[in-house]
Amino acid sequence: MKKSVITLLLLCGAILSAGAQSFELSLAKALEIALSDNPTIKVADMEIERQDWVRKQSVGNLLPSLSVSGQYSYSIVKQEMAKGLSFGADNSISTSASLSVPLYAPTVYETLRMNQTQMEQAVENARSSKITLANEVKKGYYNILLAEQSLVVLKESEKSIAETVKNTEAMYKQGLASEYDLLSAQVQLSNLRPNIIQTENSIKTSKLLFKMYLGLPASAEFTLVGTLDDFAEEVAMATVPTNSVDLSNNADLRALDIQSKLLEQQLQLVNASRLPTVAAFTNFIFSGNDNTMDFSSMMGGAMGGGSSSTTKKNEWWWQNPLSAGISISIPLFSGGKNINKAHEIRNSISQLSMQKDYLRQSVNVQVESAFNNILSAREKMTSNEITVRQAEKAYQIAEVRYNSGTGTILELNSSELSLTQAKLNYSQAIYDYLAARADYEKIIGEGFEIDTPNNNLE
């Protein structure tokens, strides 16, 4: 964590000092920054800290509690008895201290167990946030590489078509090409420009979203390390995962398991609220009263510990009773609230059990889908790789035929379009594999570690 913060500070420092100068980001470094500084991760970490404070509050209910109070009162109208006799002093001062020690508190014990499970839930939520964020960062990284590589392909095509337009224009002036050939080449070049602009805009949007994942300022400029083609060999050599996997680390299933555990503990807490509670207590009271506010006699009486038969009328009368005992609280009737609450929780447990079964089926479908997407993308990549080589050869033949006058502009345009599409399809297949692999890792609850297999490209 500390290393990630230092890394981010260095990056921010580089941005501020270099202005718009770009810095490089590898996938591993991007994950490191995101998992350290993304707001959702910070919130999840703060929730773990909050749950720790909640647990300490519950522990406090088992510790002794001590309270001290004080009071002064002046009798404006005293109590009277028959024949107009009144009693009591004008001034009264009292202080008291109370100490209570829980001996048996079943609800507190169950609350502590719930606090432990709530801490597990907070930790699991943090892990789930990291898994989701890592998936978004990876797919965002791959998406930028795909857009950048697509832009390269489109600009190569633009350059090739521009050369064709130039050659065709020269041939047209010499009477070796028709006006149709020239217009056809110019139209193909014009049609390519909107795709280039759209791709450039896509790169800008993807980078803005990527900066949000990493918690970088919108003004930061960066370039990604490598290209999508750099992953081609890795994809070809990678071991295809199996569709029969252990789903014990799936974030959604783990969340429901913890929620189910919490409901069981809530039921135990409700049942514990019907049990008696036992506590030991000690009370001490120190009080005095008099008809004057003679502090000298007040202090003397207090030091003397009370009064005697020679007590004067205006002397303070002090008392200091001390008591100790055990209190037992037994709940007998609460309007049926606890019984109805228990029924409500049991109903929730039954609902959650059905949700877990349905979710497990859904996760199995997701695993199968991700597995099929991985296989499909890998097969398409292999097929498209062959198609690219064939399209390159076909274009070379069409170009030679056109320049020699034996081919038509339609053949050349068609072969150019086929080559461009084949290259785009090849890049898309690589992206599809990497994205499907990232989704697969998210489903099985992996892939958020910094040193994952697909993160080694530096």
Image (spheres, rainbow, N blue to C red):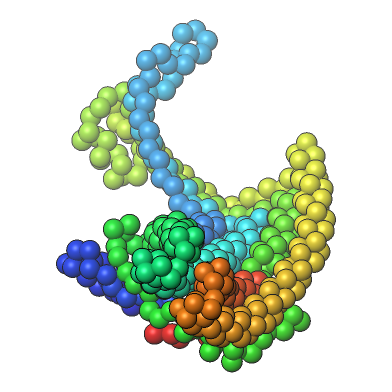
Picture coordinates of residue 263 (x, y %)? 72, 57
Residue at the spot 72% in from the left edge and 47% down from the top edge: 330
Residue 315 position (above or below residue 194)? above
Picture coordinates of residue 420 (x, y %)? 52, 72
Quarter of the image where one finds residue 171: bottom left
The quadrant of the rendering that contains the N terminus is bottom left
Picture coordinates of residue 148 (x, y %)? 42, 70
Direction from residue 395 to residue 20 in the image, left or right: left
Quarter of the image where one finds residue 419: bottom right
Asked whether 94 or 181 is in front, the reply is 181
Asked whether 4 or 429 is in front, the reply is 429
Whether residue 18 is visible, yes or no, is: yes
Picture coordinates of residue 256 (x, y %)? 70, 62
Residue at the spot 63% in from the left edge and 58% down from the top edge: 111
Whether residue 64 is visible, yes or no, is: no
Residue at the spot 25% in from the left edge and 27% down from the top edge: 293
Asked whether 423 or 134 is in front, the reply is 423
